[in-house]
Image (cartoon, rainbow, N blue to C red):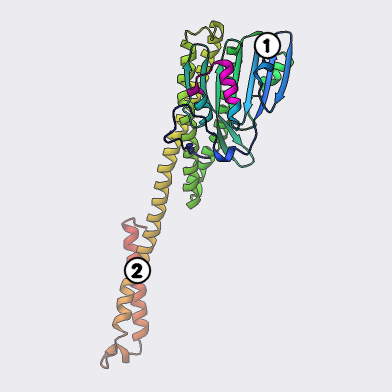
Amino acid sequence: MKLFKKRIKKTGLPPGTLIVSDNKKIQKSHISIFHYNENSLQETTHDTLDYEKLINSLPVYWVNVDGLYDVKILETIGKAFSIHFLSLEDILNTDQRPKCEEHEDYIFLVVKMITHNKEKDEIDSEQVSFLVTENAALTFQEKTGDVFNPVRERIRKGKGRIRKKDSDYLVYSLFDIIVDEYFEVLEHLGEKVENLENEVIDTPSTETAAKIHSLRQKVLLLRRSIWPLREVINSLMRSESTLIHDDTKLFLRDLYDHTIQVIETIETYRDMLVGILDMYISVSGNRMNEIMKVLTIISTLFMPLGFLAGVYGMNFKYMPELESQWGYPVVIGVMILIIICLLAYFKKRKWI
C-alpha cells in the first residue's frame, strides 16, 4: 500500500497529452457494456471500442473500462461523447484527488475505490473515474476487479430502481457500493486498532511500533481518499445540471450522511492511534525506568561491598585483620549487614 503514487513524467508536454506508463503498455484493457431499460437488457464485452456499436434503441447504457492501458479507447470515448482532453488526461493520471467537474454535456467525477485484500491483509486503493452524460454512465478503472458486482446483478435481474432510472441513478448506485466498502474496510481496521491497544497494554514489543506506524498509514490513506468525497457528493446534491435529477438528489443526501459517518469513524481511529502511540511510548518508558531502577539498586548494593573488597585486596604486609582468625567471617558479616541496612532504607523510602 502506497500513500502517494508515482506520477507519470510529462515535463514539457502540452496539457491534455495522453501517456500510458511503461508498466501498463504490455497489458490490455477490458470493456464491458450494459444497454438496458425497464424491459430489456443487453450485456456485451470487448477488447476494443467502436462507438458505432454503442448506439442502439435502448436509452441507458453503462460502459466500464477495466485497465487504462489503451490510449485509443480514451480517444474514441472522448470523440464520441465530446469529452474535454483535460478530463481524459485526468482519467489516465491515477493520482487525482476526488473531485467533481461540471461541463456542458457531461459531469466528470473522480473517487477512490478502497478494498481490503484478505490474502495479503493489505488495503488497496484504486482511482475510479466517472463520466455522466444524458443517457450513459462511463467508468474507468486502473485494473480488473471491483466492488460493482452487486450493481451488475441488480441490472441483470431487474431488481431495484436501476433499470427504471437514468444514468445519474446508476452513478449514485456505484458510489453507494464504494462507500459501503469503506465501512467493510473500517470494520477490519477497527479490529486491528482494538487488538493493537490490548497488545500495547499487555505485551508491547519492538514490533508494536511498526504495527502502529502501518495502521496510521492506512488511516491516512482512507482520510486522504474520503475527505474530498464529501465535497464531491455535496457538489452533486447542489448541482443545477439537468443531468442530476431531483429524485436522485434525495438518494445522494443519504449517501452524504454515510460519508460523514465514515469520516467521523476515521477521525476516531486516528485519535485512537495517537493515544495508542502515546501509551506505547509511556509503557516503554516505564519499562525502561523499572529496568534502570533494578540496575541502580543492584549497583548501589554492591558499591560498599566493592569498597570493602578493594580495601582488603591491597597487598600491604601490616594489616591486622589479615592475621585474625575471625577476620574473614567478620568482613562477610559486615557486608551482609550493609546489604540488609540498605534494603531496609530503600524499603522505608518506598524505592522498592
In percent of the image, x 61 and y 42: which residue is there?
A: 120
Q: Position of residue 16 (x, y in %)?
A: 47, 26
Q: Secondary structure at mark 2?
A: helix
Q: Which residue is disc 1 drawn over? A: 163
Say left or right for 205 vs 291.
right
Magenta highlight on residue 77? yes
Residue closer to the observer: 109 or 121: 109
Q: Separation of disc 2 and disc 1 at Cα?
A: 84 Å
Quadrant housing residue 195: top right
- In this rendering, is residue 204 above or below 324? above
Q: Amino acid at mark 1?
A: Arg
Q: Position of residue 51 (x, y in %)?
A: 65, 18
- In this rendering, is residue 284 above or below 125? below
Which region shows up in magenta?
73-87
The numbered dot on residue 301 is 2
Magenta highlight on residue 290? no
Q: Earlier in the sequence, mark 2 or mark 1?
A: 1
In percent of the image, x 55 and y 7: which residue is there?
A: 245
**Quarter containing the C terminus:** bottom left
